[in-house]
Amino acid sequence: MPVTGAPLTSPMIELRDVVKVYHTNAGPYAALKGVSLTVAPGEFVAVVGRSGSGKSTLVNIITGIDSPTAGEVWVAGQRVDAMSEKEKTRFRGAQVGVVFQFFQLIPNLTALENVLLPMDFCGKIPPRQRRERAMHLLEQVGLAGMAHKFPAMLSGGQQQRVAIARGLANDPPLLVADEPTGSLDSATADAIFELFERLVADGKTVVMVTHDQELARRVDRAVVVSDGRIVDEIVHRKAGGRRAREVTHG
């Protein structure tokens, strides 16, 4: 059973000395080396770093897609690393929206059906409310008129918007996006980023992996990952019309 009991005022995400070691033909490979990270509810955080630095492993650990070799992973007050795979799947469906770089929409389902799927799987949203909610989410991402289109009939930016609507299907408090703008042109990427900003303004927590330094400057905090460790945290605040920058080395 999942370990709970954290107070309601607890962080949305808390990683405690997380280690992840993969066993390969060349020997063990440490993708994460004692990572600790706290993300507050309603915070917009970018995870940045070079390819192979451990960014994707970090977000996969947060979502429960992957499991740590050592350390603790707390999300929304629950200890994710102590859950069974079945419990993780149920938890992720209800509490964490996941958005991938290449959308991962089901090609033979319409946009509306792709958004409905997590609701049908999780059972969190009452059946009578699901279709109306799915249409509302598509409207929220600007695609109400594309509800009955298949993914192949949509542009890359439109497919990513459907993927975001799908990630929000069960009204999770946390949205985790791995390179959500990486395959999009700059104008479309900016529109997707502005959608994330609106979600944060509505109280969601967003964690986004990105290579885009310009986008990383627009979040609440940028976490810099290198060689499996967090080496910088850059906090941006607007105070008196000026941008403040705080750097933590670790």
Image (tube, rainbow, N blue to C red):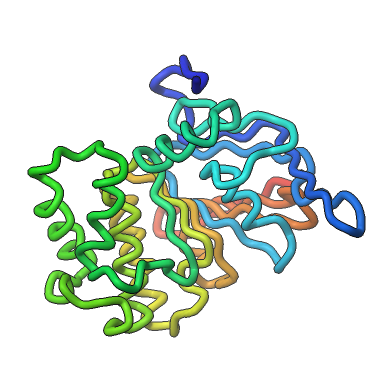
| Residue situated in front as seen by the camera: 182 or 68 | 68
Above or below, comparing residue 45 to residue 85 in the picture: below
Picture quadrant of residue 18: top right
Q: Is the residue 86 above or below the residue 229 in the image? A: above
Outermost residue on the top side: it is: 5
Q: Looking at the figure, which quarter contains the C terminus? A: top right
Q: Position of residue 52 (x, y in %)?
A: 74, 64
Residue 81, quarter of the rendered image: top right
Of 68 and 33, the residue lying toward us:
68
Residue 192 position, x and y percent, is 36, 69
Could you tell me which residue is drawn at 30 percent across and 45 percent down?
121
Q: Residue furthest right?
A: 26
Q: Is residue 239 visible?
A: no
The residue depicted at 10 percent of the width and 45 percent of the height is: 129
Q: How many numbered dots are placed on residues in this image?
A: 0
19 over 143 or under it: above or below:
above
Residue 12 position in % (x across, y down): 46, 35
Whether residue 31 is visible to the viewer of this picture, yes or no, is yes
Q: Is residue 119 rendered to the left or right of residue 18?
A: left
Q: Describe residue 28's horizontal placement relative to residue 179 as left or right.
A: right
Q: Position of residue 128 (x, y in %)?
A: 8, 43
Q: Residue at x 31, y 64 (%)?
A: 195
Q: Which residue corresponds to the image point at 48% horizontal and 31% vertical from the top-left?
A: 11
230 relative position to 213: left or right:
right
Q: Name, please, the residue furthest toward the front.
A: 108
Horizontal side of residue 145 vs 95, given as left or right? left
